[in-house]
Image: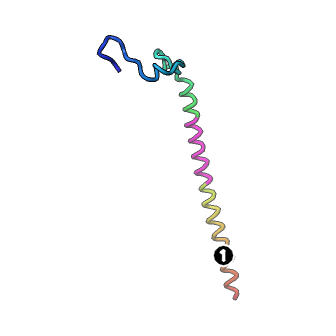
Amino acid sequence: MAASNSYEMTSWADQWDSSPDPYPANYDQSNTSTKAKYTKKVEEGFGKTKSVASSGMKKVKTGAHVGFHWIKEKYHKTTGKQ
C-alpha cells in the first residue's frame, strides 16, 4: 500500500502488533530441500497405502464372493433333500 508521499504507509498489523514477523522480508525460500524431502516421502507413503488398500479390497471382494457361494451351496443342499 503506497501513499502519495515518498514513505510507505504501515498496515494495521504493523502499527499494533509488536511481535516480529515469522518470516523476515529478506527470507530466502530456496532452502526447501527439507520440505521437498518430506513431501516426497509422504507421496511415496500414499502410493504404498493406496496399493495396500487396493489389494486388501480385492481380497475382501474375493472372500465375500467365495463365502456367498459357499452359503448358497449349503442352502441348496439342505433345500434339495426335502
Q: Secondary structure at mark 1?
A: helix
Q: Residue at x 64, y 75 (%)?
A: 72
Q: Quadrant of residue 78?
A: bottom right
Q: Residue at x 63, y 64 (%)?
A: 64
Q: Quadrant of residue 8?
A: top left
Give amino acid for label 1.
Answer: Glu
Q: How is the image coloured?
A: rainbow
How many numbered discs, if any? 1
57, above or below 39, in the image: below
Q: In front: 58, or 45?
A: 45
Q: In front: 81, or 53?
A: 53
In the image, which residues are magenta?
A: 42-56
Q: Residue at x 67, y 73 (%)?
A: 71
Outermost residue on the front side: it is: 16
What residue does disc 1 label? 73
73, above or below 45, in the image: below
Outermost residue on the top side: it is: 6
Where residue 32 sits: x, y (%)?
A: 52, 23
31, above or below 58, in the image: above
